[in-house]
Image: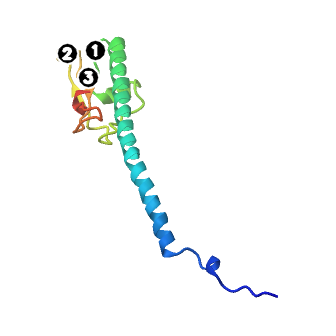
Amino acid sequence: MIESRPGRAGRGFTLIEMLVAMAILALLLSLVVPRYFDSLDRSKDAVLMENLKTTRDVIDKFYGDQGRYPDSLAELVEKRYLRSLPLDPITQSNRTWIIVAPDSPIRGQVYDLRSGAKGQTKDGRPYGAL
């Protein structure tokens, strides 16, 4: 009967094998992580554009129904044109919107909406100009 003696198979990985595996993992992460964060920024830009489009559409519907623009964004929620104030995904707040008033204050206070975020979108446009 042959006795088995403890060999390399029972001891686990060597330090060199672990370093090679970690180097390969670091290389893969260095390729994937920048793309992940770039896609996050692009998705925030897309959500901002959609929130602005939807809110502007609601302001126009309010004007069509009431014959005037709303006095505040909260009025859109009170009269159930919106379920809640939209979130600016760049600032993570619904209180940073910049309100643009109409030419005539008799017609209301909220003619348009702009983002109060600093900086630019991924395609170079300033957030406040969207």
Asked if residue 114 lies left or right of residue 55, the reply is: left
Does residue 94 show up? Answer: yes
Image coordinates of residue 6 in percent, x first then y, are: 66, 85
Q: Is residue 68 above or below residue 126?
A: above
Q: Residues within 10 Å of mark 1 (few under 14, many from 20)?
A: some
Single out the mark in the foreground, 3 or 1.
Answer: 3
What's the residue type where badge 3 is placed?
Answer: Asp
Residue 68, quarter of the rendered image: top left
The N terminus - image quarter: bottom right
User: Is the Cβ of the residue at disc 2 closer than 8 Å to that at disc 1?
Assistant: yes
Near-viewer residue (48 or 54): 48
Query: Which residue is pictured at 46% across the width and 59% down the height?
Result: 25
> Which mark, by number, is residue 68?
1
Q: What is the distance, in whole Å, between disc 2 and disc 3 at their CAs? A: 15 Å
Image coordinates of residue 122 in percent, x first then y, are: 30, 35
> Going from the N terminus, do you reach mark 2 or mark 1 first?
1
Query: Which residue is pictured at 42% across the width and 30% down the height?
Result: 83
Q: What residue is disc 3 on?
A: 112
Q: What is the distance, in whole Å, between disc 3 and disc 1 at their CAs? A: 13 Å
Q: What residue is disc 2 on?
A: 106
Image coordinates of residue 33 in percent, x first then y, are: 40, 50
Q: What is the distance, in whole Å, between disc 2 and disc 1 at their CAs? A: 8 Å
Near-viewer residue (76 or 13): 13
Asked if residue 107 lies left or right of residue 28, the reply is: left
